[in-house]
Image (spheres, coloured by chain):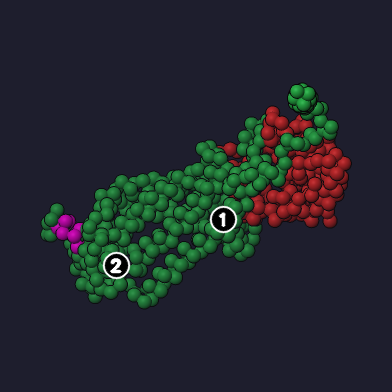
Chain colours: A red, B green
Amino acid sequence: MARMKFLCDADRCIECNACVTACKNEHEVPWGINRRRVVTINDGMPGERSISMACMHCTDAPCAAVCPVNCFYTTADAVVLHSKDLCIGCGYCFYACPFGAPQYPRVGNFGSRGKMDKCTYCAGGPEADGTAAEFEKYGTNRLAAGKLPLCAEMCSTKSLLAGDGEIIAQIYKERVTKRGYGSGAWGWQTAYRETIAS
Amino acid sequence: MARFVAQARFIIGALALALIIAIAAPASAQQPSAVNPTAASVKEQQLLNALGTGDAIHGRVTIPDQKSANLIHPAGRDWRQFHEVTLRWIAAIAILGMLVILVVFYLVRGQVKLESGYSGRRIVRFNAFERAVHWMTATCFIILGLTGLNITFGKPLLLPLIGEPAFAGWAQWAKYAHNYLSFPFAIGVFCIFLIWIVGNIPNRVDLEWTKRGGGIVGHDHPPAYRFNAGQKMIYWVVVIGGTLVAASGYLLMFPFYVTDIQGMQLAQTVHAIIAVLFVAVMLAHIYIGTIGMEGAFEAMGEGTVDENWAREHHPLWLEQEMARTGPNESQRQPMATPAE
């Protein structure tokens, strides 16, 4: 089985936000929830870089560790998914997540913030693959259909890469070697405790 | 003379050469031989290295949710360590430690007996309103404590016993209870602060009481007014601890209204530590108010205490009450339990 990862080549990202839009459209994510977003560092200054960031599907995921009801699970492809049936909306996964990935449908927490929502790596949830129940809670299950996450698939500059960690790391390494520079595999050190030498 | 001219020509020539180089230098700097577009580009490693404790790599986003402008926030890992490891140790040591101390104390010291026996004369200690406030706060506290501990210890202890769906269902209701019962609890703490502030200001009698260890060990009965130093300590733990727990709890209940992610993590840390210490202290309070001391529960149960109990534990208060009401007016009641 593959070890699925995301990699955003910041030297290619043009902050077009198409990944964000594609994600929202594909999964029919409610208003106010962003499973993916593009963050611009040093905006307007020399050396500005934009990075598309979502759930990184961490090794030893902090969200899963702090979840008081154990609603997270890791698939055979190393994708970190969660069950909205178990989630109690406590918000702890957001405090633990280094990437700000978990999202909640309601801002107030008077009774509940609602069930947490986050990037599923286009791999749905615990329901049977491709069912209406799965789509309603987690969005499209592209991985079960043999497709990679849509955000990366439609990235116009091929900045955002998704797929087996070793393969996308190889692609990135080749790019860095060829062009002679790279600002780093953003988030890898934090998510996977490893980085790509560049 | 000829030598001087030659020297002057040399100096002028050297100056001219220096001038040409100086003029030419900026021009060559404007035309670099190789383009390096990353010379000034931000690198993840540099940003990570430059991060202070709790800091995040922060940028700009075009979506309204400004929390998402934090790209990488490694401090989440520290909070995880606190929540999964440190907090559990603190809670286990505080709560189990207190239970062990209380059990050992009970086995060694036993119940603090009413040495002069029941007199049958009752004196009002807490009126109906005081008791209502106490029990409202106490009931809320027990439920808040259990549902709060469920967040910390439910997953390792209760979940394996009842399974994930049942545990998630219970945890959902526990969270509702925790959120909503915080309101009567906070009101209760505020009322406690108001109704018992008189009598809980530390004074010189408390020094004497503390020096004699409250008479807990042995048969000593140091004098005390309505509240002894131990009770005053409980009062201030409830007032200060309750305020901190409520304030940090409301920050958690209304996430990101007043603070950012660091503030939320801090609020949770403060809330959890204060809460488990609070539980530990309250275990001691429950112990001494029930099986730990003969005749103590009646004070909060029925509202009255036996005169002998008051004489042994709160003699100065009894004097005040007698002076106020006169000894003959103190309530006479048939003995509920035979004198020993």
Q: Which mark is residue B213?
A: 2
Q: Picture coordinates of residue B38 (x, y %)?
A: 77, 36
Q: In the depicted view, which residue is nearer to us: B333 or A116?
A: A116
Q: Nearer the viewer, residue B188 or A195?
A: A195
Q: Secondary structure at mark 2?
A: helix
The structure residue drawn at horizontal position 55% and vertical position 47%, both measured from the top left corner, is: B265
Where residue A8 appears, x then y in whole percent? Answer: 77, 41
Q: Which residue lies most toward the bottom here?
A: B108
- Check if mark 1's residue and mark 2's residue have beta carbons within 8 Å: no
Q: Please tell me whether residue B11 belongs to the stretch shown in magenta.
A: no
Q: Quadrant of residue B277?
A: bottom left
> Nearer the N terminus, badge 1 or badge 2?
1
Q: Where are the magenta residues, as a range?
A: B314-322
Residue highlighted by disc 1: B82
Q: Is residue B7 above or below residue B327?
A: above
B194 left or right, relative to B143: left
Q: Residues within 10 Å of mark 1 (few under 14, many from 20)?
A: some
